[in-house]
Image: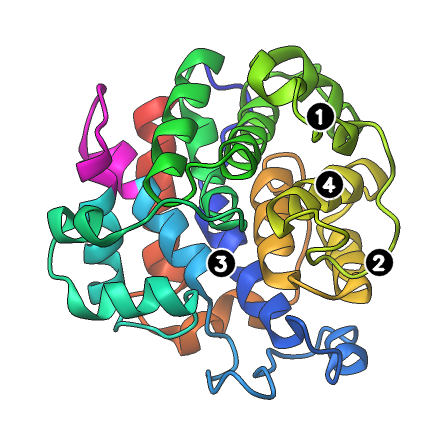
């Protein structure tokens, strides 16, 4: 039984994503963002302040699959959801260039599956994996995280990063005795040998180096994203503390923040946040904003509680 029910998981993912996206790979607005007074628009992305990115949209799509269907899940269920959510969200910009181009021209999941080459080592499979933590067993979490990763990121980096994120999410929802600094140990206990025998397991025991979260020295952003998330959840004891540290790091801020807030929200759901974060999300759009996300999150938690 779920022990830490948090109906706002999707909302927290979206708020963190929208806020931290203003400094994604660009530090121009760092000092303004550290004031936490309002949403800011990224200097070059062309999105309005408070607009979330593909991190949230694809997390919502994964959540919709878990809501709409029961196991066994299939790749087509997820592919259909990715196309549908892209379309109902207004065909937002900001996906990776190749994936955006495919989404712009397909109309259904079968077409998407037919066009994709799932060889990416980036963090797209991880950034959408937080909602998968609601599944009731570790075995289900690992299986479904792997299944959805293989659609776009069927690589050791993609599969590992998705499984690690989903496991951390599951731990905070179901395991009262697992504290955020212990999530790395929890992952090492439950991840399959395939992951622990790779060169990635150090992310659970070695502190993040306080540098920008991006690919470096042959290490993909999928791995650095997980590394940064594990570290920030171990070090900080509030959502705002988590966000400040991620903004100061820089790099892929929106993905790290969306994942970290999505996971941590189950433990810090009573923390008072600046009111604009919820009220001005997606400029208050009823189809994509806070009201929509809150309702969807409540339905997801109700199904699996």
Circles 1, 2 touching at the beta carbon (< 8 Å): no
- Residue 284 is drawn in which quadrant? bottom left
Left or right? Give the position of 273 relative to 71: right
Cα distance between the residues tagged 1 and 4: 11 Å
Circles 1, 4 touching at the beta carbon (< 8 Å): no
In this view of the protein, which residue sits in the foreground, 96 or 51? 96
Secondary element under disc 4, as helix, strand or loop, is helix
- Residue, disc 4: 227
Q: Residue at x 66, y 42 (%)?
A: 223
Please report the bounds of the magenta region as a residue range: 64-78
The mark found on residue 14 in the picture is: 3
- Residue, disc 1: 183
Considering only order in the chain, which callout, 4 or 1, is on the residue closer to the N terminus? 1
In this view of the protein, which residue sits in the foreground, 289 or 127? 127
Cα distance between the residues tagged 1 and 2: 21 Å
Considering only order in the chain, which callout, 2 or 3, is on the residue closer to the N terminus? 3
Left or right? Give the position of 112 relative to 56: left
Number of marks in the rendered image: 4
């Amino acid at each position: 039984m779920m022990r830490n029910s948090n109906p706002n998981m999707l909302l927290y993912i979206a708020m963190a994503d929208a806020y931290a996206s203003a400094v994604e790979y660009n530090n121009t607005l760092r000092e303004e963002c550290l004031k936490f007074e309002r949403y800011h628009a990224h200097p070059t992305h062309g999105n309005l302040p408070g607009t979330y990115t593909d991190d949230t949209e694809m997390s919502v799509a994964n959540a919709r699959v878990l809501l709409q269907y029961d196991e066994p899940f299939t790749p087509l269920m997820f592919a259909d959801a990715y196309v549908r959510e892209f379309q109902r969200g207004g065909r937002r910009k900001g996906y990776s260039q190749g994936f955006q181009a495919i989404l712009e021209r397909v109309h259904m999941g079968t077409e998407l599956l037919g066009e994709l080459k799932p060889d990416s080592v980036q963090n797209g499979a991880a950034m959408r994996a937080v909602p998968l933590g609601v599944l009731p067993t570790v075995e289900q979490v690992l299986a479904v995280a792997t299944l959805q990763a293989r659609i776009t990121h069927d690589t050791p980096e993609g599969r590992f990063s998705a499984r690690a994120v989903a496991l951390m999410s599951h731990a905070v929802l179901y395991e009262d005795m697992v504290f955020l600094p212990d999530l790395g140990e929890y992952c090492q206990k439950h991840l399959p040998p395939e992951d622990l025998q790779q060169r990635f397991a150090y992310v659970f025991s070695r502190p993040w180096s306080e540098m920008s979260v991006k690919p470096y020295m042959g290490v993909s952003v999928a791995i650095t994203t997980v590394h940064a998330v594990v570290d920030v959840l171990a070090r900080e004891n509030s959502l705002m503390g988590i966000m400040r540290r991620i903004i100061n790091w820089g790099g892929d801020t929106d993905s790290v923040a969306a994942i970290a807030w999505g996971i941590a929200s189950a433990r810090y759901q009573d923390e008072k946040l600046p009111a604009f974060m919820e009220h001005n999300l997606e400029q208050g759009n009823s189809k994509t904003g806070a009201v929509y996300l809150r309702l969807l999150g409540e339905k997801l938690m109700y199904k699996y509680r």
